[in-house]
Structure formats: structure tokens, C-alpha cells
Amino acid sequence: MGDVLAGMHSTWEFDSDSVLIRFERGIRTPKLFQALGERRVPYEALSAVELTPGSKRGTVVLRAVPREGADPLLEAAAGQLKDSSDPYRLVLPAERELLADYYATELRALLPDDPAEPAGQYLVAAPPAPQSFKAYDGKASFDGQVVAFRWFPTGASTAKWKAGDQFFPVGELEGVEWRSPEGLSGHLRLRPRGAEVLAEADQDPASVVFGLGYGPVYESLPFAASVLEAVRAADPVLALESVCAAPAAVPQQRSDPADVAERIRHLGELHDAGLLTDDEFTAKKAELLAEL
């Protein structure tokens, strides 16, 4: 189409076979959008196009709905992203509704013949390696071939500290599980082939745990998507399986009291340093005590 549609926080540039979504950089732009920068989405990666009233009065939302299995970022997110952080939403002033409707109609005409069919491979690129972020219990890094977890002495559980720093070639992985840091028990868990999945992420050397200020969405989700794309590229057979569905419920196990005491001590240090408010310290301490 060759046209450009500018909205809040992003601009869509329409080409003959894809739409280039460019995200703004600004204090009000969601940090995930800033981290992504831009994304090129082929029309064959889409299953539908929606135009709905916005949550804010006087706005409308144009949303391109990706096909299942087309985007590693959304597959890793597994439905946990808030609407405000959805990269496929373009928020526009209500007075531009007719223009938005025009583009929605044009986009629908370019959808694949079988949009409901899951994509056989990723059609939208993941954020490229290298990727890294700080979790509560260690630093996670990915160079495109190997995922490394290096533990922090003040945050890692005894089990992780005893296991030592961990290194996972993507060819030895079968999946990635990301649980948002904006909810309870946020973590990133790797799934090595044939390995037992431990119930508690803080006891699993194949996991890093999120916390207050650790593993934010705009860092940990692009990381998870980048690893997931590399895992699929290493073994294309996995592209036919849903290896990153919403995390399944697992039996709860009680945490080691020594680990809980150490984590509460670390929280106290953050509180004393003014990095946690009284309410944040009390809430997190209660959460940790509930694990006993």
C-alpha cells in the first residue's frame, strides 16, 4: 500500500507484503516498545484485523491479530501481556476512525487464504541476540548459541549456589517458560531435553526468579523470545509443537527455611538502602514467609 498510519506510541508503514511497526521513544512510551524498536510483520503472519473502541475515551484501537505460532514474542508471552504493552495494537484518536476502518479493510484483503491455520514456522523475527538481564537471583545472558545463568550470592537459593553457574546450549533445550514479573511467582525457566522440571523456580538451576525491579517485562520477555527462536531454529520439529504454552500448575513445595531467611535478609538490605518502601518490604517479606 505504501501508506503510513501514525498513532499513539507507534507508526505503521504499509508495504506490499508486510507492515513495519516503528515504536516511538519517549517517556510515555511503554518500555517494551522502546526495547523492541521496530518490527516487520508479514501479512501472512496475521489471522485477523480488529477495530474497536479504545479503553480511553475518544480513542479507537486498530489491532492486527497474529496467527498462532507466527511470533516468538507472543508465544513466549503466552497471553500475559497487558493491552498497553501489546505491540500489535495501534491507538488512534476517535476522529480518525474512518481512516482506521479503511486500513482495516485493506489489511483484511491481504490476509492469507487460511488465516486460522497455525503458522508452520516463525514469520516475525524475535529480538536478536545478544540479550541479557538481571534477575533476583542471578544474571541471565544469551549470545545466540548458549544461555548462561550466573548466580548472585545474595539472591540465589542454596540449591542454585551449590549447582554453580549454569550454561545451556540451545540445541539441548526444548522450550522456554516465561511467567510475567508483573504477577506472582515471576520467572524464566529453560526446559532442557529430558530433564525433570522442579516445582519451585527458586530451586531449579534451569530458572531465574524475578522480583521487585528484577527481570522487567521489557528485558526478560525479549530475552525469552530470542532464546525460543534459537531453540526452534536448532530443531525445526519443535515448530510443530506448543512448547511455550501458559505454565502448567505444578505441585507446590515448601522452600528451604535457610533460603527464605537469606532472601529476607537481602530484602532488609534493599529496604535499609532506601530501594524498597515500607509497604513493598512488608508485602515481599509476607510472600516469602508464606513459602514456609
Image (cartoon, helix red, strand yellow):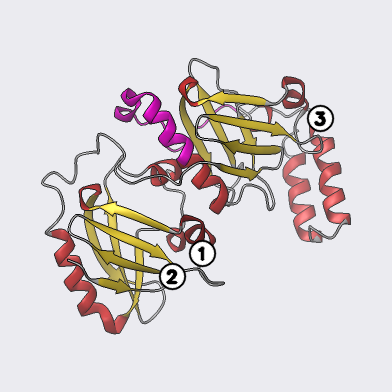
Q: Which residues are magenta?
A: 226-251
Residue for badge 1: 30
**Which of the pair 182/23 is nearer the observer?**
23
**Residue name at image x 70 percent, y 26 percent:** 165
Q: Position of residue 207 (x, y in %)?
A: 61, 31
Amino acid bearing label 3:
Pro
Magenta span has 236? yes
Please say if the residues under marks 2 and 1 sit with CB atoms less than 8 Å apart.
yes
Amino acid bearing label 2:
His
> Crowding near pointer 2: few (<14 within 10 Å), some, many (20+)?
many
**Quick one: which residue is furthest to the top in this view?**
194
**Residue name at image x 46 percent, y 44 percent:** 128
Residue for badge 2: 9
Residue 67 vs residue 212: left or right? left
Examine the image and state in which quarter residue 11 appears.
bottom left
**Which of the pair 153/129 is nearer the observer?**
129
Upstream in the sequence, badge 2 or badge 1?
2
Name the front one of labels 3 and 2: 2
Upstream in the sequence, badge 3 or badge 2?
2
Alpha carbon of mark 1 to alpha carbon of mark 3: how far? 38 Å
Query: Residue 257 has which mark?
Result: 3
Q: Is residue 36 above or below residue 159?
A: below
Disc 2, SS: loop
Magenta span has 36? no
Query: Residue 85 has which mark?
Result: none
